[in-house]
Amino acid sequence: MSRFRPAALLVLALPAASACVSLAPRSRAPSPQASVVPGIPLMTFAEDRCGAGSLALVLSARGASHPVEELEAVLPEVEGRGVLSVDMLLAARSRGFDAALLTGTPRSLQRELAAARPAILMLRLLDAPGERRDIYHYVVADGADPSRGLFRLQYGDGKARWARLASIEDGWKAAGHALLVVRTREETDAVLARAMTLESERRFDEAEALYREVLEVRPDSVRAWVDVGNVAAERGRRADAEAAYRRALGVDADDRDALNNLAWLLLEAGARLEEAESLALRAAAPPGPDRPRAQDTLGRIQLARGRCDDAARTFREALEAEALADGTRAQLQEGAAQAAACPQR
Amino acid sequence: MMKRSHRLVLPLALALGLGASLPASAERIASKPDAPSAARASDLARVADAAGTGEVRLALGALGLTPSEVDARLAQLSDEDLSRLAGNLDQVQAAGAVPQYIWILLAIFLAVSIIIMIV
């Protein structure tokens, strides 16, 4: 009989581990300074619905009501395994949110919770022998207690557990510290606006950090890529600036700001002027309020290439625009004067 | 001849003209806020060349997805998503299902428990 006991215990452990809530850490007492995302409910969902359930919980805390059943219907289940982390990310984005699947750290989780944004962690509950047999689970972090190093976790059983990340570290590490962060577009826009303010105050490092925070959750933001490029160019980091402008053009090949600023960057470096002119030509083609600036860039590239007649024509056309800002007009006039005095003319 | 003269003119223009041709305040178009809806359409052709696509494709395939199911996901991910995931493939996982073998083990456990109680 004694021979059976270890085997029985092992067999007991496996199905116990399979239930989504069975390996949840023991809850500790939070301090009075602990805070929870306002208005977030304690939610119960079946263990095989932790994908839809955790996403519904996070979206509801962001002010969007998406019932578990609705999300379950659009979150395809990989047979015998559950809902893909990638599908969770795409489902959040398709509902109008900015989202990212990050490699989480205590600090990044703290950052989300300090801004009253719950986040989803993926944990491995069972490391089973053999391939494709491990069991994973989504949990929601919705509160923090920095003074005691605790985070509030919801496993989907309607209970709140205050625990240290160390208590779930093995399972979180096995899932690559997967952290799904979800933000409203308004929140991201506000971060972008703060970054622009910092940039205008020439606090470039802080501005760039915020631009990159925007790009974490909105990686296809042409504006944020151009803005990162502008900051990098201001700091003299030409390679980073070029990479950022090219990334913006990867999203929108016709974006005037990216075309113009990349052309200007190449002009400043005095390198690849043929490419710079090609970019500036594209930037200067469509109508719009920034067209004269792109024409100014084009004219100066033509000057640098010794094409004085072309430059003179470009500046002349730009000066014909009806509404020109004083600074832009002055620059165009100065460029036109250079073209007129050009030795190759 | 034409090329030769161009070669002579360009460095001269760069050395003498470029500095003078650039205004004191660089005419870079300033940073702007985002457009109201800047979502990018799905584009599988774009991600085909993105760094990390191959690794993520393999990881999704290893989870049992068909090639068309994999492509459907890849087309919606940004270059940064793919790069990030490729750098941490442990995140490419599915969660929330109780595999069938668990129920088999549970049945064995119950049977063993009953036997232990009887013996």
Image: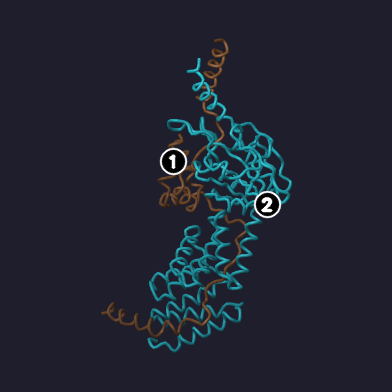
Chain under numbered label 2: A
Q: Is residue A138 left or right of residue B88?
A: right
**Residue neighbourhood size for the residue with mark 2, other residues' Cα within 10 Å, grouped as few (<14), some (14–19), many (≥20):** some
Nearer to the camera, A109 or B73? A109
- Give how far across and how far down residue B99 sits, in percent: 52, 28
Q: Are marks 2 and 1 on the same chain?
A: no
Helix, strand or loop at disc 1? helix
- Residue A151, relative to residue B34: is it above or below? above
Question: In the orientation shown, which residue stands out farthest toward the left?
Answer: B1
**Residue A126: percent from left, percent from top:** 51, 33
For chain B, the rendered hue is brown
What residue is disc 1 on? Answer: B59
Which lettered chain is shown in cyan? A
Residue type, label 2: Ala
Residue drawn 42% across the image and 52% down it: B51
Which numbered marker is on residue A116? 2
Residue at the (49%, 22%) spot, across then down: A7
Q: Is residue B24 above or below residue A165?
A: below
**Residue A168 percent coordinates (x, y):** 56, 41
